[in-house]
């Protein structure tokens, strides 16, 4: 299962999936600290509408999707 590449994040790197997607997908994925108001992810979540998948389950997933 996914560990969000904690070993990479601890080394101040992006998770491997984000790095790979951004190399080939034109920046389609963003990873960061939503609790930091100065982070890029916080700014984008505040600017663009996004959705959580199965938010009705009450698990508050951290993954957000734009354009669904």
Image (cartoon, rainbow, N blue to C red):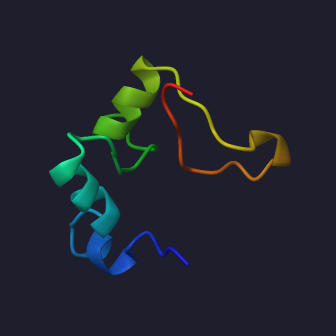
* Quadrant in which the N terminus is drawn: bottom right
- Is 20 on the left-hand or right-hand side of 47? left
Quick one: which residue is furthest to the front in this view? 24
The foreground one among 37 and 25 is 25
In the rendered image, residue 50, in percent from the top left (x then y), is placed at 54, 28
* Quadrant in which the C terminus is drawn: top right
Quick one: which residue is furthest to the left in this view? 23
Q: Please report the residue visible at 69 percent of the width from the left and 48 percent of the height from the top.
A: 60
Report the number of discs.
Answer: 0
In the rendered image, residue 45, in percent from the top left (x then y), is placed at 45, 29
Q: Is residue 47 above or below residue 34?
A: above
In the rendered image, residue 39, in percent from the top left (x then y), is placed at 30, 40
The foreground one among 2 and 7 is 2
Q: Is residue 59 above or below residue 10?
A: above
Q: Please report the residue visible at 21 percent of the width from the left and 66 percent of the height from the top.
A: 13
Q: Is residue 37 above or below residue 34?
A: above
- Is 2 on the left-hand or right-hand side of 36? right
In the rendered image, residue 42, in percent from the top left (x then y), is placed at 40, 35
Q: Please report the residue visible at 21 percent of the width from the left and 67 percent of the height from the top.
A: 12
The foreground one among 58 and 23 is 23
């Amino acid at each position: 299962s996914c560990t969000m590449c904690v070993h990479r994040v601890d080394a101040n790197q992006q998770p491997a999936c984000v790095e790979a997607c951004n190399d080939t997908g034109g920046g389609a994925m963003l990873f960061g600290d939503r609790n930091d108001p100065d982070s890029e992810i916080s700014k984008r979540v505040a600017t663009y509408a996004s959705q959580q998948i199965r938010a009705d389950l009450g698990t508050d997933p951290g993954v957000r999707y734009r354009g669904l």
